[in-house]
Image (spheres, rainbow, N blue to C red):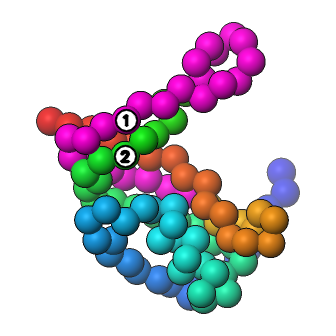
Amino acid sequence: MKYTQGTLGRVFVARLEDGESIYEAVEEIAGREGVECAAVMAVGGIRKGKVVTGPENPRGRVIPHYEEFDDARELVGVGTVFPQEGKPSLHFHAGMGRE
């Protein structure tokens, strides 16, 4: 096993307004603040969205399956930010539910 120790740098906390995109908000903050890499945690609610729920065919070519919703859900998620084509890019996984 190989591992290393790091230290916690800056911490940003943001509350998104109704209609704002998690991806756009995180990437905007990262770009504005000069963040090159980051861990992202999210908890709260989301009113509507379009999410990838897995591949269309788990045994075939990987084509994402999308689900759209407009019924408000609770959300908890984690992600990372790393540069892609010179700009911060969020990769995010989340669990959402109702009731």
Residue 1 versus residue 26: which sits nearer the camera?
A: 26
Asked if marks 1 and 2 touch (Cβ < 8 Å), the reply is yes
Residue interval drawn in magenta: 55-79
In what element is the residue under mark 2? strand
- Residue 68 drawn above or below residue 62: below
Q: Is residue 14 left or right of residue 29?
A: left
Q: In the image shown, does 7 or 55 lie closer to the viewer? A: 55
The answer to whether 93 appears left or right of 2 in the picture is left
Amino acid, disc 2: Gly
Q: Residue furthest right?
A: 2
Tell me which numbered mark, 1 or 2, is placed earlier along the sequence: 2
Residue where numbered disc 1 is placed? 68
Q: Which residue is mark 2?
A: 49
Residue at (26%, 65%) from the top-left corner? 18
Residue 7 in view here:
no
> The C terminus is located in which quarter?
top left
Tell me residue 81's x, y (percent): 64, 66
Residue at image point 37% right, 35% down: 68
Pointer 2 local density, CA inside 10 Å: few below 14, some 14–19, many at least 20? some
